Amino acid sequence: MADAARWVLHLDMDAFFASVEQLTRPTLADRPVLVGGAGPRGVVAGASYQARVYGARSAMPMGQARRRCPHATVLPPRFALYQALSREVMDVLRAASPVFEPVSVDEAFLEPPDLAGADPETVTAFCVELRRAVRERTGLPASVGAGSGKQLAKIASELAKPDGLRVIPAADQDAVLAPLPVRSLWGIGPVSGEALRKVGIDTIGKLAATDAREVVGLLGSAMGSELHRLARGVDDRPVAPRGAAKQISAETTFETDLTAMTAVHTAVEKITAAVHRRLLADGRAARTVTVKARTADFTTTTRSETTAFASRELSTLAAMARRLADTAVGEGGVRLLGVSVSGFSDAPPLALFDAVPSAQGWTAAPVAAPPPAGEPLPIPSGVAVDDPAELEVDAVDGPDGLDVVTSDDPAIRVGTGPTRPDADDAPDPDRPWRAGDDVHHAEHGHGWVQGSGHGRVTVRFETRETGPGPARTMAADDPALSRAEPLLSWRSLGETGDRLT
């Protein structure tokens, strides 16, 4: 049995993306909400618990989710807002424990030294205060689990959902684990789960009772031994910060397959620009660019190129990506394109020019000057990080098909730019507003677009601070109506007008 003196905590924000939308758009507080792309290839990034009742889930095709829950409100992701709230949550957790490990944008492990050897009542009181602090800071619900190791803490937080708390003393862990499905354990996916099921092992208790040699024979030496230990409640993995991300990436799934190379180049440049903004925000330079292309028949091809020196110049990275796309794209339409950068260094070379690959060979492009001291770097609609680690976010169709897929830590900088990667593009003159856009009206204040068309737009004027507000329909070209910063739906600017940080 695991060491009874050890207490590991796992905090998980409940339906994070959807909960943020319900918090900042109070009319939706008790309604089913789906966050993700609304196009034919859209994917659900987040589903509220009201939508989950009908079978809608994250990573499900949006069309399927909407069929299951046709009355759900579908909203595009607002990553800058999620990043801001994630940072607030992580700040609370860091203050609560010096031993802290972020797992994703909405969850983390803690091992507070003060809880070593504590009784369950003391641990419960600590967790109650932790949940209170998160809600007070953000307005959002969180579930917390506590146990003798990371596995048990995560299972405890799952059992506590939604908006709950579960503390599992070491003496009770066998009784709690035994009846749970074997898929509840980390590392057991559909394939390994099916292999175990075929021999009658469908619960954690049965896996724990099985001879370790048989488990190793089924799942392999490394995986089998580890899972058998976890099933028996033996988990001595440390809680520790994760290392820096090895790549920054973004990708797009297009609603209509691209068939012209000019369209491919345009898309690659836009995706590279999103990656570049995050690279700048992270303060690093990259030597390797990789392009991924998936054709209409789901054939995926990747091409990479590595230069002698790291760069953070957009023209260099975009030129490499375009050239790689020429060889990655084969016959037939392109349904997905992705660009990633890796081979990081902390700063670009001390040179006035970067080498840019082109059809004419290697040419020179001036290196952009860094922004003035103290001036924030531009942040894209994707994820920008301070201390990168793994962020498990499914591909999300954004407007015009732009997905954001990353592997970064949830120590998020606050975004200051538009929500959508394409927000600077000229809007459709007949539909200048899209459902979910944040807007500001000179008379009515902050609101969000519920729908538009035929020269009219309907806006619900409300924020977290105002509570449920009225919906008003007005001319789409009303000069008093303008785009607004999504963060203002959560918290107003201070009296000094400073940025939200």
Image: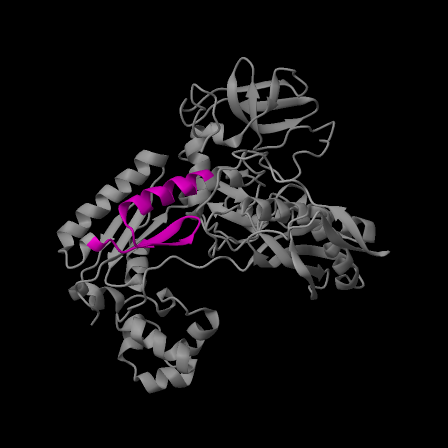
Q: Quadrant of residue 203?
A: bottom left
The C terminus, quarter of image: top left
Q: Is residue 170 visible?
A: yes
At horizontal 38% and vertical 51% (from top left) the residue drawn is 107
Residue, far right? 360
Q: Is residue 222 left or right of residue 433?
A: left
The answer to whether 261 is drawn above or below residue 38 in the figure is: below
Front residue of this view, candidates 296 and 121:
121
At horizontal 69% and vertical 45% (from top left) the residue drawn is 367
Place of residue 67 in the rendered image (x, y in percent of width and height, measured from the top left): 55, 47
Q: Is residue 188 left or right of residue 310?
A: left
Count of marks, rendered view: 0
The N terminus, quarter of image: bottom left
Place of residue 117 in the rendered image (x, y in percent of width and height, measured from the top left): 15, 59
Q: Is residue 212 left or right of residue 291?
A: left
Place of residue 343 in the rendered image (x, y in percent of width and height, measured from the top left): 59, 61
Q: Is residue 99 magenta?
A: yes
Q: Quadrant of residue 300?
A: bottom right
Front residue of this view, candidates 232 and 417:
417
Front residue of this view, candidates 24 and 266:
266
Coloured how? one colour
Q: Is residue 142 left or right of residue 50?
A: left
Place of residue 388 in the rendered image (x, y in percent of width and height, measured from the top left): 48, 53
Q: Is residue 71 visible?
A: no
Residue, far top? 443
Q: Which residues are magenta?
A: 84-113
At horizontal 48% and vertical 49% (from top left) the residue drawn is 56
Q: Is residue 160 magenta?
A: no
The answer to whether 229 is drawn above or below residue 413 in the figure is: below
